[in-house]
Image (tube, rainbow, N blue to C red):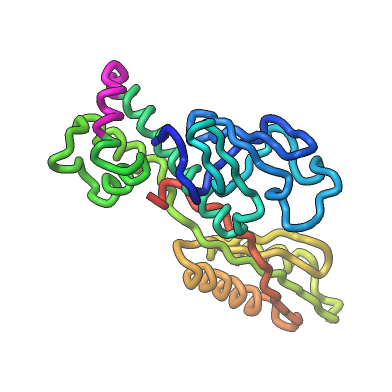
């Protein structure tokens, strides 16, 4: 939902459009590219020797509105008055709102209601503060919202799009497996067979790194079940490779970004 102008103290997302020795101009993405000025002193708390070390054209920044002159139609914003946490929250909200808008646009097209787009969008924004709130309410209810003037067919299509976009979350755990032995009778074939058995019987993924190290990982609907798969795989390996020294060290796994629809 785009308003005409921001209010004093609002956090806004701007795109740098022009840079001068005295500051920068930025267009506010949520306010129909309304132009605002970012004074040099509001870019950073420290001394700025070269403004281009802090800003570049088309860079997106989260700023705070610090001055509004209605008579001149000018707005000043500050970059240094925005904390990293507030900037992250603002960007996440903006991204979620834009993606919610895309889902609504897709649903309008799929239900052949594009001809009523203005009317329907107005209805949504009269009943809800923004697109995200509308989709959140719809997703939580799991069925068309009673009493809403938004067409039922559109609501049903939005629900279908949300469900088809929502992926089942998988949790992954990984370990570095070290296999070593001083038994000359042990062969590489016995190791391969043991690891192959562990993979096929538990669903774990195991691959060679470099002797004597292997990578083993498991995925499941929760961490406990993933860890249980690892334990079963380790039990199989220990049973089949008696006489081996077996060690495992947990590997840190980067978390994937949450599916945006799951936040609705």
Q: Quadrant of the N terminus?
A: top left
Describe residue 22's horizontal placement relative to residue 233 as left or right: right
Question: What residue is rendered at 76% in x and 74% in y?
Answer: 179
Q: Is residue 198 above or below residue 160?
A: below
Residue furthest out toward the left: 147
Foreground residue, 190 or 68?
68
**Where does the image place residue 46, in percent across and percent down from the top left?**
78, 57
Question: What residue is rendered at 33% in x and 46% in y?
Answer: 133
Describe residue 147's horizontal placement relative to residue 131 as left or right: left
Describe residue 88's horizontal placement relative to residue 162 as left or right: right
Q: How many callouts does the rendering have? A: 0
**Where does the image place residue 238, in percent across and percent down from the top left?**
65, 78
Question: What residue is rendered at 51% in x and 73% in y?
Answer: 228
| Residue 124 visible at all | yes
Q: Is residue 230 above or below residue 9?
A: below
**Where does the image place residue 255, in percent across and percent down from the top left?**
59, 59
Residue furthest out toward the top: 115
Foreground residue, 40 or 223?
40
Residue furthest out toward the front: 71
Classified by dominant secondary structure, the portion drawn in magenta counts as: helix
**Where does the image place residue 89, in percent across and percent down from the top left?**
52, 54
Q: Which residues are magenta?
A: 111-123
Query: Quadrant location of residue 82?
Result: bottom right
Question: What residue is rendered at 80% in x and 37% in y?
Answer: 21
Foreground residue, 39 or 126?
39
Foreground residue, 190 or 232?
232
Q: Is residue 116 magenta?
A: yes
| Residue 92 visible at all | no
């Amino acid at each position: 939902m785009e308003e005409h102008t921001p209010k004093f103290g609002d956090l806004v997302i701007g795109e740098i459009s022009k840079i001068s020795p005295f500051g920068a101009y930025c267009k506010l993405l949520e306010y129909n590219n309304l132009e605002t000025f970012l004074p040099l002193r509001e870019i950073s708390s420290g001394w700025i020797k070269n403004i281009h070390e802090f800003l570049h054209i088309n860079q997106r920044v989260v700023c705070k509105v610090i001055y509004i002159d209605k008579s001149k139609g000018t707005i000043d914003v500050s970059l240094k008055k925005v904390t990293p946490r507030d900037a992250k929250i603002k960007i996440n909200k903006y991204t979620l709102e834009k993606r919610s808008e895309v889902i609504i646009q897709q649903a309008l097209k799929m239900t052949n209601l594009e001809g009523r787009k203005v009317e329907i969008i107005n209805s949504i924004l009269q009943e809800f503060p923004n697109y995200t709130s509308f989709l959140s309410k719809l997703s939580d209810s799991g069925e068309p919202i009673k009493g809403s003037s938004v067409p039922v067919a559109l609501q049903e299509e939005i629900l279908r799009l949300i469900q088809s976009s929502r992926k089942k979350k998988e949790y992954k755990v990984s370990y570095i497996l070290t296999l070593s032995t001083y038994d000359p009778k042990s062969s590489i074939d016995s190791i391969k067979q043991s690891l192959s058995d562990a993979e096929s019987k538990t669903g774990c993924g195991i691959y060679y790194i470099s002797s004597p190290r292997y990578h083993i990982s498991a995925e499941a609907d929760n961490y406990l079940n993933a860890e249980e798969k690892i334990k079963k795989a380790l039990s199989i390996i220990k049973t089949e490779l008696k006489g081996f020294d077996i060690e495992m060290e947990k590997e840190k796994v980067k978390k994937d970004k949450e599916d945006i629809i799951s936040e609705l």
